[in-house]
């Protein structure tokens, strides 16, 4: 439908808001049907239409996600939303060219790789409504998604609201999350203001049995492997998915409120590391020093469930207007085009064309048919000046030229011994020990929360 609209001459429409290039494509009836976000028009990409120009692979607006990685995160969010639980719109990678896109200064119209997402018809956005209108289930599904994705940018403008009528005749405001480009960072650093739902009252309501069982049925490792067969993720980003999945799974299993889980992940003070950040640092230190993990304590035997479980079943978030997950094949959203000749010969193409995207992601070669072993690691631009981060001088090296008094003022008060390694891949032995330590530390943290619940009964 959208390809027909392009063929009929309907120009892609650039969204008025946002920091990157987001284009709405229309069907023959001139209705918006999908949105396309080119990789090289992301913030600090080479063709950004808002003036935030840079090179692919540079640091972006959010720590831990590089320019050029947002389109991959959009696809990963859809894939990690198993069974369409949180209503993430269907998303895939596609390649399109059009004169309306922001092309290089040479004026050449080139193919652009980017994320192609279903345009969801909605009645409002969350910023225009009171949070009290949303049911606990609608809020919980968003909270669980953002925690699992380590989403660093959940504002009330990227939560769409659609009013619908339930079978019992009651009205419900369905929340539909979009804009997941700043998810799955290589470092966990989330402030309270990064999650618009952080202080919503629904977080103090226990999960329903349906929502709780959904989380307990997830297999984080299988989910990550599924994502890696479609888009690349750097090792540190993969590790953070596992860290978040471990915390959410253990918290839900122990019936800890989402209110308390959010406060483990988030910084209440933007300059003070969160509880989870501290736990990760301690676990990393013990893993690199190969310290043995203390024997586990079986929490269920010490602390039976102190929170009532809700037995009211929740209505599925799917509606007749949504495409069922089984039918929403990513390939069905792919625009079939012919790749430029000799894609490996970069000398024949302009430096700003889509060959900066990973080889094999050409839409004509089916981006969802790439073996995981052949997927390159992000950043997708291998010419980035930040690609070899280890070559940059450390803060200690920079301080050597300072006056002695200035060194005392500017030097770090405490320098974690392994701080410089936390964003890099670990060996198999250290990785295994890291997660064993983290599991132990999270158990201790949850046990303290359960103690508080018991005292308040």
Image (cartoon, helix red, strand yellow):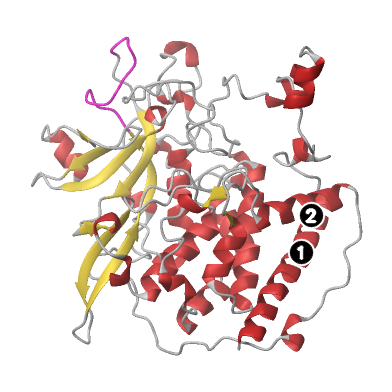
Judge left or right: residue 437 versus residue 307.
right
Residue count near mark 1 (Cα–Cα under 10 Å), binned few <14, some 14–19, many ≥20: many
Residue displayed at 91% across by 56% down: 291
Above or below, comparing residue 298 to residue 30 in the picture: below
The reply to whether the C-beta atoms of the residues labelled 1 and 2 are less than 8 Å apart is: yes
Q: Is residue 122 visible?
A: no
**Which dot marks residue 283?**
2
Judge left or right: residue 328 versus residue 303.
left
Q: Nearer the viewer, residue 35 or 282?
A: 282
Which is the main secondary structure of the residues drawn in magenta? loop
Q: Residue furthest left?
A: 29
Q: Nearer the viewer, residue 343 or 11?
A: 11
Q: Is residue 230 visible?
A: yes
In the picture, residue 124 is in which quadrant?
A: bottom left
Q: Which residue is mark 1?
A: 441
Q: Is residue 99 magenta?
A: yes
In the picture, residue 52 is in which quadrant?
A: top left
Residue displayed at 15% across by 45% down: 27
What SS does tag 2 mark? helix
Horizontal and vertical percent position of residue 178: 35, 52
What SS does tag 1 mark? helix
Above or below, comparing residue 112 to residue 275 in the picture: above
Residue displayed at 10% across by 44% down: 28
Quarter occupied by the C terminus: bottom right
**Which dot marks residue 209?**
none
Q: Is residue 320 magenta?
A: no
Horizontal and vertical percent position of residue 301: 76, 88
Q: What are the residue bounds of the magenta stretch? A: 96-107
Above or below, comparing residue 265 to residue 315 in the picture: above
Horizontal and vertical percent position of residue 58: 54, 26
User: Could you tell me how far apart the alpha carbons at marks 1 and 2 are, in whole angstroms?
Assistant: 8 Å
């Amino acid at each position: 439908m959208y390809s027909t609209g392009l063929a009929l001459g309907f120009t892609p429409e650039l969204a008025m808001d946002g920091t990157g290039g987001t284009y709405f494509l229309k069907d023959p009836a001139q209705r918006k049907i999908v949105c396309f976000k080119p990789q090289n028009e992301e913030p600090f990409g080479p063709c950004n239409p808002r003036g935030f120009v840079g090179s692919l692979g540079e640091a972006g607006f959010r720590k831990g996600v590089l320019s050029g990685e947002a389109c991959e995160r959009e696809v990963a969010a859809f894939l990690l939303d198993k069974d369409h639980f949180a209503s993430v719109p269907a998303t895939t990678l596609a390649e399109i060219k059009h004169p309306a896109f922001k092309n290089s200064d040479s004026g050449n119209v080139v193919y652009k790789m980017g994320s192609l997402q279903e345009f969801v018809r909605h009645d409002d956005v969350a910023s225009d409504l009171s949070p009290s209108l949303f049911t606990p289930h609608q809020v919980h599904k968003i909270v669980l998604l953002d925690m699992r994705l380590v989403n660093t940018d959940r504002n009330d403008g990227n939560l769409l609201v659609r009013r619908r009528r339930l079978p019992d005749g009651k009205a419900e405001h369905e929340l539909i999350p979009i804009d997941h480009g700043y998810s799955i960072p290589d470092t966990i650093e989330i402030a309270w203001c990064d999650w618009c739902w952080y202080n919503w009252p629904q977080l103090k309501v226990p999960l329903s049995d349906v929502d709780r069982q959904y989380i307990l049925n997830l297999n984080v490792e299988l989910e990550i492997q599924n994502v890696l067969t479609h888009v690349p993720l750097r090792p540190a980003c993969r590790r953070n998915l596992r860290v978040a999945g471990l915390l959410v799974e253990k918290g839900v299993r122990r019936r800890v409120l989402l209110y308390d889980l959010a406060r483990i992940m988030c910084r209440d003070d933007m300059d003070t590391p969160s509880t989870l950040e501290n736990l990760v640092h301690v676990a990393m230190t013990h893993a690199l020093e190969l310290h043995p993990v203390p024997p586990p304590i079986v929490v269920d035997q010490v602390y039976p469930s102190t929170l009532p479980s809700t037995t009211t079943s929740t209505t599925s978030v799917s509606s007749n207007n949504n495409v069922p997950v089984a039918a929403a094949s990513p390939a069905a959203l792919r625009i079939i085009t012919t790749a430029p000749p000799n894609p490996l010969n970069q000398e024949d193409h302009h430096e700003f064309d889509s060959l900066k995207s990973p080889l094999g992601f050409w839409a004509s070669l089916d981006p969802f048919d790439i073996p995981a072993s052949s997927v390159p690691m992000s950043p997708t631009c291998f010419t980035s000046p930040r690609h070899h981060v280890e070559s940059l001088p450390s803060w200690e090296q920079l301080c050597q030229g300072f006056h002695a008094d200035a060194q005392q003022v500017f030097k770090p008060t405490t320098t974690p011994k392994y701080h410089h390694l936390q964003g890099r891949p670990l060996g198999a032995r250290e990785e295994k020990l890291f997660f064993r330590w983290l599991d132990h530390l999270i158990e201790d943290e949850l046990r303290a929360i359960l103690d508080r619940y018991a005292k308040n009964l």
